[in-house]
């Protein structure tokens, strides 16, 4: 049995879903969607559609988590649906690019908004970002209960802040002479390519919903808690995103929303004056810190699970005797994420990591369809309308990945090459280790 401690209950699990999704993007730059759709109705529709597709992905992970309540989440799902090789590729890509890169990118956004209060040069920005990564890694080193409590506290705070913005926006906005100015921009309606680009942008804003599955062995009653957290958390975020965008469009002219790269600050300035920028900057600092807390917490569980299966060095699969955490995996992630902050720019980090995970999400969705046909597959929760829901989600995930490759071919090729390098590494690893990878030898009690 695992020595990991079950410290995450329903509230903290739900907070993990909400907190890892809501970062900075919804407060800073919804302009991509608005620019593509160019109408209030179109913007609201796309955010709702992105939320519905995210919910489909969350429900797919909910079923798989209820069938395989083991640390590692997507790694375990790919391993069980296909082979240890594909699971290894996910973990390899996570460490070198996808997960560590997102940690570094969000830490850079955090430091940029800290600089609103304390002037920082380029070196200072990177130092603050690395400091945030190391601080949150230390918090999670000493216990998942402490780490999840910190993350939950910041999540509750940001949800309350969103509620305040929405209520105050419609209340104070009622004093403005006009609302929903330019409800649509002149010209032909958006084509399918524009709609696809807008939905892809929306789905990226919903990123992180799957990470709660990484902590299944530290969650109480994971077969029930994780599916409920995914469902409730995704719905909360969808409502928050639709409501926030409605406020932005209620207060600001459509063309200003399209042009803005800090829309929440502009909306606040329209309501209460320019001094509100301090409050919005503080909100973004708190929001990014909370999101970073959840992402730092979840990643090491994948590397821990891989090491326990014999696919990484065994020393990464140890649990701290006092704190009950995968402490060595936490330290390894902290060091590499900090190195990425030091070595890469925010744009390079973002464009190289954001699309590759969607290829794996498509594989997870198809994997659920395959698992449904196997004897002995007994999930506690079942996604309705299979195979339609997972196949639609898989197709959407591939469209998202393809759109990002088309937009950034060079950086996307580099990111994909990093992931594919894992195949020869896996082959060499398996050849050199006489003990074959273990595929979840023991399944912890779900209750």
Image (cartoon, rainbow, N blue to C red):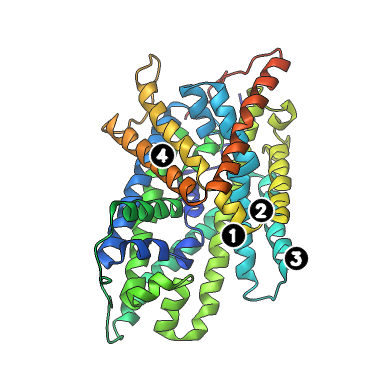
Local secondary structure at mark 2: helix
Instruction: Give whichever of 39, 73 is nearer the camera.
Output: 39
At a point 56% along the width and 57% down the height, the residue shown is 290
Give the CA separation, mark 2 to mark 3: 20 Å
At a point 68% along the width and 43% down the height, the residue shown is 333
Q: Are marks 2 and 1 in contact (CB under 8 Å)?
A: yes
Q: Are marks 2 and 4 in contact (CB under 8 Å)?
A: no
Q: Position of residue 162 (x, y in %)?
A: 42, 66
Mark 4 against mark 1, which lies toward the viewer? 4
At a point 47% along the width and 27% down the height, the residue shown is 68
- Residue that numbered label 3 is attached to: 123
- Residue that numbered label 1 is attached to: 289
Give the CA separation, mark 4 to mark 1: 30 Å
- Residue that numbered label 4 is attached to: 398
Give the CA separation, mark 4 to mark 3: 38 Å
Instruction: Give whichever of 238, 230 is nearer the camera.
Output: 238
Give the crowd class for mark 1: few <14, some 14-19, many >=20 residues within 10 Å.
many
Give the CA separation, mark 2 to mark 4: 33 Å
Q: How many marks?
A: 4
Local secondary structure at mark 1: helix
Q: Position of residue 298 (x, y in %)?
A: 58, 43
The answer to which image quadrant residue 107 occupies is: bottom right
- Residue that numbered label 2 is attached to: 136
Q: Position of residue 180 (x, y in %)?
A: 27, 75
- Which tag, 2 or 4, sits closer to the chain's start? 2
Give the crowd class for mark 4: few <14, some 14-19, many >=20 residues within 10 Å.
some
Quarter that holds the N terminus: top right
- Which tag, 4 or 3, sits closer to the chain's start? 3
Mark 3 against mark 1, which lies toward the viewer? 3
């Amino acid at each position: 049995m695992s020595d990991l401690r079950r410290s995450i209950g329903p509230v903290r699990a739900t907070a993990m879903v909400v907190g890892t999704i809501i970062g900075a993007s919804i407060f800073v730059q919804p302009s991509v969607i608005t620019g593509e759709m160019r109408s209030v109705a179109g913007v609201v529709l796309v955010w709702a559609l992105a939320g519905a597709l995210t919910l489909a992905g969350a429900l797919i992970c909910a079923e798989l988590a209820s069938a395989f309540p083991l640390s590692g989440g997507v790694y375990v799902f790919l391993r069980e649906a296909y082979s240890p090789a594909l699971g290894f590729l996910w973990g390899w890509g996570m460490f070198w690019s996808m997960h560590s890169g997102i940690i570094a990118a969000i830490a850079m956004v955090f430091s940029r908004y800290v600089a609103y209060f304390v002037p920082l040069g380029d070196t200072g920005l990177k130092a603050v970002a690395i400091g945030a990564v190391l601080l949150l890694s230390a918090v999670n080193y000493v216990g998942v209960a402490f780490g999840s409590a910190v993350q939950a506290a910041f999540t509750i705070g940001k949800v309350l802040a969103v509620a305040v913005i929405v209520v105050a926006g419609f209340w104070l906005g009622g004093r403005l002479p006009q609302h929903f100015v330019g409800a649509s921009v002149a010209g032909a309606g958006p084509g399918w390519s524009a709609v696809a680009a807008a939905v892809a942008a929306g789905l990226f804003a919903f990123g992180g919903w799957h990470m709660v599955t990484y902590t299944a062995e530290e969650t109480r009653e994971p077969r029930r808690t994780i599916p409920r957290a995914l469902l409730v958390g995704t719905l909360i975020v969808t409502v928050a995103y639709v409501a926030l965008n409605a406020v932005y469009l209620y207060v600001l002219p459509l063309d200003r929303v399209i042009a803005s790269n800090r829309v929440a600050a502009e909306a606040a300035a329209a309501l209460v004056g320019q001094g509100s920028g301090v409050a919005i900057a503080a909100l973004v600092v708190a929001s990014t810190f909370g999101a970073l807390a959840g992402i730092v917490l979840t990643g090491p569980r994948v590397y821990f699970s891989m090491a326990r299966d014999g696919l990484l060095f065994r020393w990464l699969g140890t649990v701290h005797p006092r704190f009950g955490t995968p402490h060595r995996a936490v330290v390894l992630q902290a060091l590499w994420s900090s190195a990425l902050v030091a070595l890469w720019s925010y744009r390079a980090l973002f464009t190289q990591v954001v699309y590759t995970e969607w290829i794996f999400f498509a594989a997870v969705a198809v994997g659920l369809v395959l698992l449904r046909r196997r004897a002995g597959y007994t999930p506690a929760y079942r996604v309705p309308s299979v195979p339609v829901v997972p196949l639609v989600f898989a197709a959407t995930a591939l469209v998202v990945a393809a759109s990002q490759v088309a937009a950034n071919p060079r950086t996307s090729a580099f990111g994909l090459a990093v992931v594919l390098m894992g195949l020869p590494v896996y082959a060499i690893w398996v050849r050199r280790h006489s003990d074959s990878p273990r595929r979840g030898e023991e399944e912890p009690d779900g209750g």
